[in-house]
Amino acid sequence: MWTIAAWVLIAVIGIALASFGVTGSSLFDRVNSGEPSAVDSPSTRADHMIAESSQAGDSITLIVGNVDVADPAVLEALTPPMAQSGAVLNSTPGVASAVSPTILPNGPANPAAAPLLASNGRGLLMVVELDKPTDSGTEASTTDRVVEELDQLAATIRQDVPGATTLVGGGPLIADEIIAQMEQDLATGELVALPIALLVMVLVFAGFAAAFMPLFAALAAIAATLAAVYAMTYITDVHTSVINVITIVGVGLSIDYGLLIVSRFREELRARSFSGPHRTASLTARTLSATLSTAGRTVSYSALTIAASVAGLIAFKPSMLRTYGVAGFLIVLIALLTAITLVPACLALLGPRMVRPSVLGRVPIIGRLFHHNAEIAPETGVFSRLAGAVQAKPWVVIAGVLAILGLLGAPALHIELRNSTVELLSSDSTQRQWLDELQESYPATSTAPIVLVSTGSQEQTETFADGAVAALPEVTSVTTIPRDGYIEVDVRLETTDAQGPTARETVKQIRKMDTDFEVLVTGPAGRLVDYMDQLAAGAPWAAAIVAIATLALLFAMTGSVLIPIKALITNVLSLGACLGVLTWIFQDGHLADLLGFTPMPGIESYIVVLLMIFGFGLAMDYEMFLISRVKESWDSGLDSNAAVRQGLQRSGRIITSAALIIIVVFAGFATGELVIIKQIGLGLAIAVALDATLIRMLLVPATMTVLGQWNWWAPKPLKSVAAKLNLKH
């Protein structure tokens, strides 16, 4: 009882910290939604120089559309309200300047007005530049006052100019909208997924009490981890998506572990006979001991393997991925703690009642279903027959599964990776519409895909830019701008894709050019190139960490050398297929209407890394669940094929039930609006679906049949080590 009370207290404290914080700022107030960036790279050094020399902060812009700026009547209607708002804004503390064509000398005829006029002549801008912020509180207050004034101006314009449209947007508003959408998507995902997950678990466990325990553990684990992430925000920048990812993974792992612990407890409880209530406490204690020494050890091995895999993210240089690594490591370990402390405490509280008929068991039809689900899995059944069919033609099954995985994974061959911000929002988003309109109608105000920061003189830089840079095939224009301490060169390309292959290749070509002065390349293309380079540099180390941890822990569990190697190979094949399906859906645009997103020309780079790491970890869960039961049957004296049939029969129901619930949970989070949440939620759902069906039900039994006795082979020097670490489940 004290254990349950302690976890309830931890959960309450965690939720309170995440919701209200220590000083009144919640977890969502302290996270950021910025574009992922490389660390100590040419682009980050260039961005730092630009930020240091700039005297201005963010800008907020009002777009007035569907108006003819050449019409005197329109200008006459627009000028007074825009002049009045301009005067108010220019006198507002924290505002550096507010400008629009209507309040410039000579109006739209002023050359300075050209960038503020729509390219089609059907609109204009009011741009409000903020002072360089001294603290976040002052900046937020100034932003609120500017937005309020621009909203009032927009309402006046729509009233005075029939047919006029208005949009207000800017960096601070984009960040606010992304964070708000993240928070909403998290709530939506929980609202959709958790009730359905609870219903499925009620059917699986034939009762509410057993079904609620894994969800109770999930809530406690997530709350505790959110508190830890809140503390992390005082040490380093934390991206908003970290919250959603640890929530999704926390629910998935807690359900996996809870299902295994509760199912094994009920199995062990039914296997023990007792007479009289005086033996109830002893029976419960013995059952819990047997459960934790079998299922508890499997869960521990699984969690340690996943934790080690997630720790592989620390091998990457970008701080965002390191943050994911720390947060992921914490959620895995806390999910393990709830599984081996909170869930057993709840089981101890209920004891033998866990195998008594549920109230719903008395309902006709439902009662028969509950009775069937409450029973221990028979020695033969659907899963043993499936294993037998696979063993009859193992090579055909292997070839068929590999062909399917290859077909599903083929789209990954043309995958494009990128880093996005506002593009992650749905097409219905105000800020997405604002940015799309700004880029389409006001190209002069958009950020150049490639920005050069030169330490050379004005003459040297102009010679370099107008010569070598301008001569590159895709370059359409170069603009040299003197800045404080450096020369900026904006490079524009024929392509409209600022992070596409052409832009990235142009960055690499510029960086190969020899100069007598330093030229740093940044902009969307430069930042993505540096980020991808750092991902490529860290990938081998991360893969090595994952591989070594998997091989070591699976060997410790099975005493086999070949089973861990086979697990690595099958998991890689499964994840490759998952990545192909994800590319087919999100990059190629299939199912866009069904899932409610605007296709983008690539997949988020960090989402691919997270999918590989966390998807691999979830796959290892099912590998552990299956192999541990096969190993138990092998140790009992069965031959290899019989052990595989019995192991799959005993674990198949748990694997498929856990997979079904997790697919529902992950797909529930994919109902949100943000594309990155759709990508990670649906990606993990696909990974689990492929792993629980093609891999665990077909490929693993087939390969184990082909290997036969060799499944359990290990060199003699390792056999004694394996004996000491032997896991019986």
Image (tube, rainbow, N blue to C red):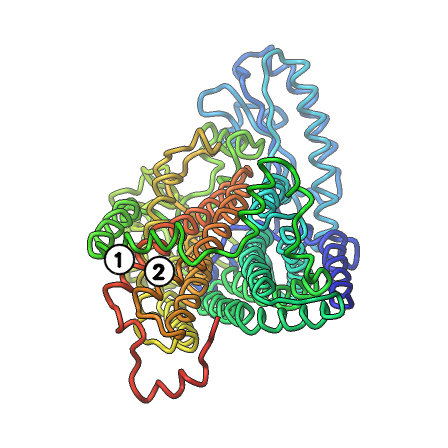
Q: Which residue is mark 2?
A: 645
Q: Mark yes or no: residue 644 visible.
A: yes
User: How packed is label 2: few (under 14 Cα within 10 Å), some, or many (20 or more)?
Assistant: many
Q: Is residue 426 above or below residue 202?
A: above
Give the CA separation, mark 2 to mark 1: 9 Å
Q: Which label belongs to residue 559?
A: none
Tag 1's secondary structure?
helix
User: How packed is label 1: few (under 14 Cα within 10 Å), some, or many (20 or more)?
Assistant: many
How far across and how far down the image is residue 581, in percent? Answer: 35, 44
How far across and how far down the image is residue 407, in percent? Answer: 26, 45
Q: Is residue 14 above or below residue 372?
A: below
Q: Which residue is mark 1?
A: 391
Q: Mark yes or no: residue 180 visible.
A: no
Query: Which of 418/510 is in front?
Result: 418
Amino acid bearing label 1: Gln
What residue sits 41% from the left and 48% below the top?
689
Asked if labels 1 and 2 touch by Cβ distance under 8 angstroms, the answer is: yes
Tag 2's secondary structure?
helix
Q: Residue furthest front?
A: 275
What residue sits 52% from the left and 45% below the top?
677
Q: Is residue 59 above or below residue 550?
A: above
How far across and how far down the image is residue 478, in percent? Answer: 36, 44
Image quadrant assignment for residue 613: bottom left
Q: Where does the N terminus fall, quadrant-wise?
A: bottom right
What residue sits 40% from the left and 76% below the top?
552
Amino acid bearing label 2: Arg
